[in-house]
Amino acid sequence: MTARIQEFLRTRREDGPCVVVDLDVVRDNYEAFARSLPDTRVFYAVKANPDPAILRLLASLGSCFDTASVAEIEMALAAGATADRLSFGNTIKKERDVETAYMLGVRLFAVDCQAEVEKIARAAPGSRVFCRILCDGAGAEWPLSRKFGCDPDMATDVLEHAHRLGLEAYGVSFHVGSQQGNVDAWDQALASSSAIFRECAERGMHLSMVNLGGGFPTRYLKPVPGVENYGDAIYRGLVKHFGNHMPETIIEPGRGMVGNAGIIEAEVVLISKKSEEDDVRWVYLDIGKFGGLAETMDEAIRYPIRTRHDGADMAPCVLAGPTCDSADVMYEKTPYLLPVTLEIGDKVLIEGTGAYTTTYSAVAFNGFPPLRSYTI
Ligand SMILES: *Cc1c(COP(=O)(O)O)cnc(C)c1O
């Protein structure tokens, strides 16, 4: 909690939950990434939090942007980034969206199969493409599974197809899984990347770039390694697998750039028990899975929660949202400890909520409005 956010919430008059993002923290995070990975360009993953003030700040600091749709490209351009600082990093794109991106000046695209290469060759001729490879996501609290990327054995063929169709086979990308707690998680993917560089060279293609993706964690309940530890481990991995032939590198931090910059203020709507002898209370907030806390799905992300009773005795609670959907329960398998003196009407502060909250908040489930957002 920063003093600026505290002051903002003290004077806020509107009702209902909101997230407040402190732009000074975003600036510190950007500078920490730039310092810890000095030869790497930063492409902020816009989906983590596309608030215009965040995009404007990062654009002014020199950040590039990883975008996944035409709307995100337009937001980054509106924030002051030029098209040469954008990548269209989604591997699943409509051909007409590739064409629009190309018209807007974007020349860097992600692919993970030949059909996607063909769309780019038709709609964005001559552009640079990088091939995303699968990564198992071990060690991540929010793994990205098998949806994106191809087997490393297939990547050389995909890149060769691009090369034959007049595109520039530019490099390789991967994502080690979001909220990655293991600083060495990049090593295996760097080994695969360097093997792809070698195979491509044997076929006459000289790749330039390794896109190291996101995955840098933010602090929730458990401590996480600092960004400088990730920088050191990644640098060691690059030296180990690329030696004297260092590629150009980029990172795409989302959570690590904005997560700790935001706080949600919410309110306790009801505290109840399911039977007289139950010792676990049910605590219902005015925000839940559909109002911005979707990453509590499977109880994956456990946010720190503060109340005015901090320091009092704690007891286990089931924590749930306000909608009439029974899936709208955030923590039940592992109950959440909250002060025994917590009361209906109390405000709670949910920390580390700058990333993946506004973008996940539904339009109006049950008439609850989407999460309001302020930047200060
Ligand atoms: C979501 C996403 C990111 C950001 O991941 P974090 O774990 O939030 O840093 C980076 N790259 C791509 C391609 C993404 O889809």
Image (cartoon, rainbow, N blue to C red):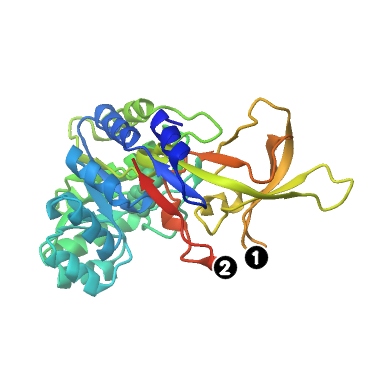
Image position of 167 (left or right of 154): left
Q: Amino acid at mark 2?
A: Asn
**Quadrant in the rendering for residue 104:** bottom left
Find disc 1 in the rendering and name its residue. Answer: 324
Image position of 11 (left or right of 71): right
Q: Is residue 271 above or below residue 217?
A: below
Question: In the rendering, at what x and y percent does residue 206 appear?
Answer: 14, 48
Image position of 332 (left or right of 148): right
Q: Secondary structure at mark 2?
A: helix
Residue displayed at 67% across by 62% down: 326
Q: Amino acid at mark 1?
A: Cys
Neighbour tally class for label 1: few under 14, some 14-19, many 20 plus, Cα within 10 Å: few
Neighbour tally class for label 2: few under 14, some 14-19, many 20 plus, Cα within 10 Å: few
Spatial CA span between label 2 and label 1: 7 Å
Q: Tag on residue 182?
A: none
Question: In the rendering, at what x and y percent does residue 125 appear?
Answer: 11, 67
Question: In the rendering, at what x and y percent does residue 18 appear?
Answer: 47, 49
Question: For disc 2, does the CB lie below 8 Å from ligand 1?
Answer: no
Question: In the rendering, at what x and y percent does residue 240 appear?
Answer: 30, 30
* Circle 2/circle 1 CB separation < 8 Å: yes
Residue displayed at 42% across by 30% down: 2
**Quadrant in the rendering for residue 77:** bottom left
Q: Nearer the viewer, residue 304 or 96?
A: 304
Find disc 2 in the rendering and name its residue. Answer: 366
Residue displayed at 62% across by 62% down: 323
